[in-house]
Amino acid sequence: MKNHLELKRARDWLQDQNGHLEREVARRMQQNELIKDVSTHALALLAEKRDNETGNHLTRTQAYVSALCGHLATHPRFASALQEPMRTLIVKAAPLHDIGKVGIPDAVLLKPARLTPDEFEIMKTHAQIGADALSEAMAHVTQPHDFGPAHAADDGALRFLQVAGEIAQSHHEKWDGTGYPSGLAGNAIPVSARLMALADVYDALTCKRHYKQAFSLDKVEQIIREGRGTHFDPDVADAYFALRDQFQTFATSFADHQASHDHT
């Protein structure tokens, strides 16, 4: 009887310890995710603040991408690409789409008017600059350093950086292959970037900039219709029209309170 009681006490103690460890692991994982989210948004804001953005551009475009992900998650063409955890990674990486703007000269980035053709060519390099920076970050965390061995980066962290790099590099590509920086066309453009392309253009058209007024919703939707199958993946454009009320709600809820400028 004594042995049985001691065995039970030992089992209870182990059960309590296992429960504590599980809760601690869950707490630390949640804490790490929070730190990653805050760091990601802080980096994105640094790029946007250089461009005189209020930061609401990031919130709006992330909301648009999230809505598109949710709507297309069961679509035959997108279901495999938008399963979890990929769907969450795309939404979380969306704010980094213009991180490459930190490498654009002030004379171009801060110009309070339309860019000349030569200036626009310089502006276009932000897509590759952002992709290269994220690629270098990915390489950095897997290589040994003077202060210690290679970091043990998990697959989730590397996949996040990869998705962020895809979005940064390819969100200005167009369905018909006339975009930049690589001239990708059709399904060669990553799904994440196709979603970001529509979200970014919608936001640029609906918001006031120093060099233009906000377009009317009718004009915005005319541009999206005309861009269906040329600028935008046709199914992504169709998803917008199914979600147009949600987009308008997000645009109103996260509206800017002062004018800013952007060069899409």
Image (cartoon, rainbow, N blue to C red):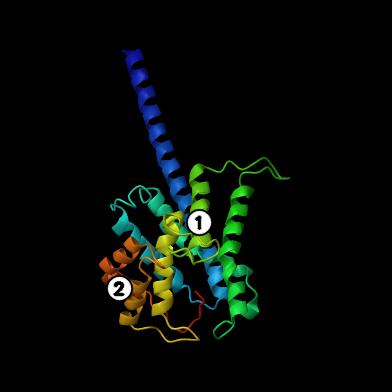
Q: 138 and 263: which one is in front? A: 263
Above-or-below relation of 230 to 145: below
Indicate the quadrant where residue 254 lies.
Answer: bottom left
> Residue 103, position in %: x, y?
63, 68
Q: For the residue carrying disc 1, how many other residues have a C-alpha within 10 Å: few (<14), some (14-19), or many (20+)?
A: many
Lateral position of residue 25 relative to residue 120, left or right: left
- Which residue in the structure is indicated by mark 1? 166
Mark nearer the viewer, 2 or 1: 1
Is residue 105 something one can see in this rendering? Answer: yes
> Residue 138, position in %: x, y?
59, 50
> Residue 124, position in %: x, y?
57, 70
Query: Residue 249 has which mark?
Result: 2
Is residue 67 something one can see in this rendering? Answer: no
Above-or-below relation of 105 to 26: below
Please tell me which residue is depicted at 41% across the width and 38% down the height of the picture.
Answer: 22
Please tell me which residue is depicted at 34% across the width and 58% down the height of the picture.
Answer: 69
Indicate the quadrant where residue 142 lies.
Answer: top right
Specify which label sits upstream in the sequence, 2 or 1.
1
Q: 142 and 174: which one is in front? A: 174
Q: The N terminus lies in which quarter of the figure?
A: top left
User: Please, what is the three-letter code of the amino acid marked with disc 2?
Assistant: Thr
Please tell me which residue is depicted at 45% across the width and 72% down the height of the picture.
Answer: 57
Q: Secondary structure at mark 2?
A: helix
> Residue 193, position in %: x, y?
45, 60
Residue at mark 2 to residue at mark 1: CA–CA distance: 28 Å
User: Please, what is the three-letter code of the amino acid marked with disc 1?
Assistant: Glu
